[in-house]
Image: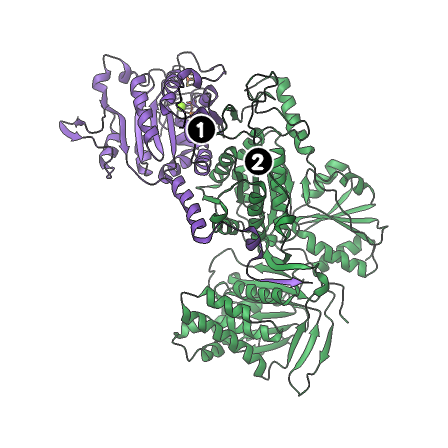
Chain colours: A green, B purple
């Protein structure tokens, strides 16, 4: 009875429980957006609802969206923070184009999000905040709650603040503190509306505020009061069920995970699987800082985290640790990559393993720190002096950040090279259900350090640049190994001996050898999804656009279009079969959140007429938007 | 060391041809370091020299230890990562006045305040040697060079004052040509736990010849130098002070660091302070003691999972 085509509108069954209780409707999917002031705790509210939903077994996808300022002036449009969650009884790919339900904690939140709401959407508003002053702050002279502005929506006016304060009357909390629990009242109400389990949130609140038991209890009380309010009040006549997405998931143990958390875990796993201790050198920057925060918690895994004086020192320290035999990692965003470029070049020349994680954000310069973009591809590809090739991998979803961190480590360790991992703000903060892998499934990344002299003349000399004929990797001889003392540096060196060399022929040879090493990296072939088997159009993307592209493709197919989809996780080198694949299609469409960077590489490399579709708004693509572009490319209207 | 090491200066010479200008002060420093290293009693494989860029930064190529010639100014950062992940190593940084104080100033001051177990040898020739003679952050004001034909305008750094201001736990100065003194300062630096900054006055006979001549000329040097010895008195402006390198109050050391007539040489300050690397590694041990060695499977599962069958 439920629709299998994502985001083409919900379908539902109705049921009236016997005994004349409230009506329960069954939906196949819902998109909820929580919106409020930066200080209203909307991210926390969204996170909790997500946890409840994940635990319930729905498929889900989230989109946090917050301002760069920690507390922009209260009640203003720039201060609005929101969290969107899409959950369903089937597999879904995106956080949803438009909310079915908006929770607006104040007039600014309502105004900032109104434009995104489709006709008939439900709006739950905190009427207590709709004062003349608050309305004036966002330029409303009349109250939209009663001047017809919201006529095409289903509005639930709720005095959230008053009700919360009332519910906490019995506690010793000052009114101001009591008011702060209103987000938990809202969460309780929504949890009732969508039949979410509540134990998790109560447990969470008790442990979060373990040191302030009265605050913990107040939040639990507010949360329950919200639930009870839904249950008893007349203004909420209907509640909804979204069944678990049993068929969407392969069997296994699942958890909800954000991209940055998955990435941090992937790095720890890479350290374990390689037997190398993890060293992170990093300088705080949005949206990468959470990886530093997370890794710093896991010192009992032998993880060393070093908050450096700047990005240059962060990568420098990581490279120094790599010289010493550690798995060296640096995490940053685009502006940090700019600072690290010279050291990445050094790592290319030293041929040492090093992971450079770039959580891309809007640019140029400071740009849009909290928004997403994928405009650092060419920076990662070419942003260094000289011929300095660096492998690039890019996860396509939050959960994939785990596996791609392991892949980045595999390449770095096997080929003795710095590797870029390109994630972005959308993957970093967004979350989805993730099947927890068994440790036994993880790849073996063990490396062998050099222990013996290797000079081809049979002497006891050590040649630091004597290459493995297969991978062209040079030996990794770490300090502490007797007899292998050697010097490496950024000056051109003779292949083999590693001695400084200014010889023109040697330099030409070294430039080509370093390039050949990267070109020769083994990466999996690209897999195309084409159910029709004879599509003429290929939609090709990379990175975080996977979800919206796949959702757009589904829609186009549902409308009868024949379209093939493929998604690149390896951008340098490209999969070996890419050129062949591109040649098989009449048209290639490349949607990107930049001005066509992948398309440029494809055109240059394969002489293919790749067509770009680009958006650089700081927000992910919408499925609807891509479906329209695809249908146009198919020759539709 | 389990076995007695009987290394000599020769063991620390690499097979590479040394390529400084004939007469450069760097030769004397190299010879002194090669002569001193056997004294450490540390096996060659456990010693690492990391340098930046400059004439001075070629130094690691000429030593038969592990070494890295990195990029301009960044050696303290690179060495910090190495020393804090490998506390078993003896890590030395070689840098110049431009490398350490211009492009790498930020890394230098932060290494000093962190007190990572590093020995930083700053070759101060008060000029940019490798780029052929521009003035440096330690050049005297009014310096006429290729880039400052009408004289340089900026006030120079006093490297040791800067180091003390950056909370350095060990600060010393010595001179390239005084092998005995240079060796004694290296010894003190090596013994120090934490970051040691040693400024070495080094003659660049091509672009800044004679910069330290008054401190070297047998005629003038006794009057021009103030030789500091821990526990020995010294006199400034007729007032006698007892030199105490361990004085927790850096005031006297700072006053000494600003003096030029006479110029103090020797150890100005050597105070005990926990090192960054030992504390970082202690946190790792503490985490294991408190929470047990990390279990990957438990970590990946977290506390909120559900089963799909
Ligand atoms: C990023 C970068 N900028 C500039 C240079 C050019 N450069 C090389 S060495 C140097 C100055 C060296 O002066 P100093 O550190 O005093 O060393 P010296 O040669 O005097 O021993 C400069 C500017 C460089 N190699 N890298
Ligand atoms: S330029 Fe000066 S510092 Fe450089 S090698 Fe020549 S004499 Fe030495
Ligand atoms: Mg110099």
Chain under callout 1? B
Residue A152: in sight, yes or no?
A: no
Point out the image quarter for the N terminus of chain A: bottom right
Q: Which residue is mark 1?
A: B46
Q: Residues within 10 Å of mark 2 (few under 14, many from 20)?
A: many
Q: CA distance from mark 1 to mark 2?
A: 21 Å
Q: In the image shown, does A223 or B6 lie closer to the viewer?
A: B6
Same chain for the residues under marks 1 and 2 in the image:
no
Point out the image quarter for the C terminus of chain A: bottom right
Q: Which mark is residue B269?
A: none
Ligand 1 is within 8 Å of the C-beta of the residue at disc 1? no
Q: Position of residue A589 (x, y in %)?
A: 76, 48
Q: Is residue A339 above or below residue A624?
A: above
Q: Position of residue A217 (x, y in %)?
A: 45, 73
Q: Which residue is mark 2?
A: A353
Q: Quadrant of residue A16?
A: bottom right
Q: In the image shown, does A118 or B86 lie closer to the viewer?
A: B86
Q: Position of residue B194 (x, y in %)?
A: 35, 35
Q: Quadrant of residue A526?
A: top right
Give the SS element for disc 2: loop
């Amino acid at each position: 009875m439920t629709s299998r085509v994502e985001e083409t509108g919900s379908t539902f069954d109705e049921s009236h429980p016997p005994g004349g209780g409230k009506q329960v409707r069954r939906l196949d999917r819902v998109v909820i957006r929580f919106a409020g002031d930066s200080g209203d705790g909307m991210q926390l509210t969204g996170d909790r609802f997500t946890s409840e939903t994940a635990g319930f077994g729905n498929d889900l996808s989230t989109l946090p969206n917050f301002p760069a300022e920690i507390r922009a002036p209260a009640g203003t449009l720039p201060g609005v923070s929101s969290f969107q969650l899409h959950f369903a009884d089937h597999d879904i790919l995106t956080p949803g184009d438009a909310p079915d339900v908006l929770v607006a904690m104040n007039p600014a939140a309502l105004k900032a999000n109104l434009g995104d709401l489709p006709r008939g959407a439900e709006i739950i508003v905190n009427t207590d905040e709709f004062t003349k002053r608050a309305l004036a702050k966002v330029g409303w002279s009349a109250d939209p709650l009663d001047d017809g502005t919201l006529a095409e929506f289903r509005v639930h006016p709720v005095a959230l603040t008053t009700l919360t304060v009332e519910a906490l009357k019995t506690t010793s909390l000052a009114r101001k503190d009591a008011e702060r629990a209103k987000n938990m009242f809202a969460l309780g109400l929504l949890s009732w509306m969508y039949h979410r389990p509540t134990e998790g949130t109560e447990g969470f609140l008790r442990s979060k505020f373990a040191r302030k038991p009265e605050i913990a209890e107040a939040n639990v009380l507010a949360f329950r009061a919200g639930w009870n309010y839904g249950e008893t009040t007349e203004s909420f006549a209907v509640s909804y069920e979204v069944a678990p997405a049993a068929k969407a998931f392969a069997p296994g143990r699942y958890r909800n995970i954000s991209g940055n958390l998955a990435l941090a875990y992937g790095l720890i796993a890479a350290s374990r699987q390689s037997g190398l201790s993890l060293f992170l050198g990093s300088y705080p920057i949005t949206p990468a800082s959470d990886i530093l925060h997370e890794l710093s918690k896991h010192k009992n895994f032998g993880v060393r985290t070093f908050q450096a004086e700047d990005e240059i020192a962060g990568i420098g320290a990581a490279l120094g640790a790599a010289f010493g035999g550690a798995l060296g990692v640096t995490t940053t965003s685009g502006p940090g990559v700019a600072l690290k470029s010279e050291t990445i070049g050094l790592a290319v020349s030293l041929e040492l393993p090093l992971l450079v994680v770039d959580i891309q954000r809007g640019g140029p310069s400071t740009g849009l720190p909290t928004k997403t973009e994928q405009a650092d591809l060419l920076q990662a590809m070419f942003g260094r002096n000289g011929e300095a090739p660096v492998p690039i991998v890019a996860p396509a979803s939050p959960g994939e950040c785990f596996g791609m961190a392991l892949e980045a480590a595999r390449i770095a360790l096997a080929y003795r090279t710095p590797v870029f991992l390109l994630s972005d703000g959308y993957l970093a903060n967004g979350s989805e259900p993730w099947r927890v892998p068994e440790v036994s499934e993880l790849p073996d990344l063990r490396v062998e350090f050099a222990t013996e002299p290797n000079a081809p003349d049979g002497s006891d000399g050590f040649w630091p640049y004597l290459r493995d004929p297969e991978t062209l990797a040079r030996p990794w001889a770490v300090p502490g190994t007797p007899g292998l003392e050697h010097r490496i540096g950024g000056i051109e060196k003779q292949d083999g001996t590693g001695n400084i060399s200014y010889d023109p022929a040697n330099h030409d040879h070294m430039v080509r050898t370093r390039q050949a090493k990267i070109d020769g990296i083994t990466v999996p072939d690209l897999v195309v999804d084409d159910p029709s088997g004879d599509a003429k159009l290929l939609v090709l993307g990379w990175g975080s656009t996977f979800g919206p592209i796949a959702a757009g493709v589904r829609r186009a197919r549902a409308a009868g279009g024949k379209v093939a989809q493929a998604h690149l996780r390896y951008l340098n080198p490209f999969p070996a079969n890419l050129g062949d694949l591109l040649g098989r299609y009449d048209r290639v469409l490349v949607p990107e959140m930049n001005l066509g960077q992948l398309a440029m590489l494809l055109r240059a490399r394969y002489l293919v007429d790749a067509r770009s579709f680009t958006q650089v708004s700081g927000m992910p693509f919408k499925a609807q938007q891509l479906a329209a572009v695809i249908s146009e490319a198919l020759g539709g209207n | 060391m389990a076995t007695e090491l009987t290394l000599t200066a020769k063991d620390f010479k690499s097979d590479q041809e040394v390529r400084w200008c004939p007469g450069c002060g760097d030769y004397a420093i190299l010879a002194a370091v090669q002569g001193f290293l056997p004294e450490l009693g540390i096996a060659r494989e456990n010693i690492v020299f990391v340098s930046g860029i400059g004439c001075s930064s070629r130094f690691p190529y000429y030593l038969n230890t592990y070494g890295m010639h990195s990029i301009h100014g960044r050696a303290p950062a690179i060495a910090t990562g190495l020393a804090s992940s490998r506390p078993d190593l003896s890590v030395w940084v070689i840098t110049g006045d431009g490398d350490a104080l211009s492009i790498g100033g930020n890394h230098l001051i932060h290494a000093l305040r962190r007190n990572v177990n590093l020995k930083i040898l700053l070759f101060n020739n008060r000029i940019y040697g490798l780029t052929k003679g521009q003035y440096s952050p330690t050049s005297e004001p009014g310096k006429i060079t290729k880039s400052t034909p009408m004289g340089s305008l900026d006030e120079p750094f006093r490297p040791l004052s800067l180091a003390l201001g950056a909370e350095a736990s060990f600060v010393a100065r010595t001179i390239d040509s005084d092998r005995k003194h240079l060796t004694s300062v290296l010894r003190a630096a090596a013994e120090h736990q934490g970051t040691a900054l040693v400024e070495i006055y080094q003659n660049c006979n091509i672009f800044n010849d004679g910069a330290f001549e008054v401190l070297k000329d047998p005629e003038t040097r006794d009057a021009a130098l103030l030789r500091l010895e821990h526990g020995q008195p010294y006199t400034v402006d007729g007032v006698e002070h007892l030199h105490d390198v361990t004085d927790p109050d850096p005031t006297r050391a700072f006053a000494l660091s600003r003096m030029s007539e006479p110029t103090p040489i020797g150890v100005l300050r050597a105070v005990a302070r926990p090192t960054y690397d030992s504390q970082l590694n202690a946190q790792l041990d503490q985490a294991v003691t408190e929470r047990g060695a990390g279990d990957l499977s438990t970590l990946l599962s977290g506390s909120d999972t559900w089963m799909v069958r």
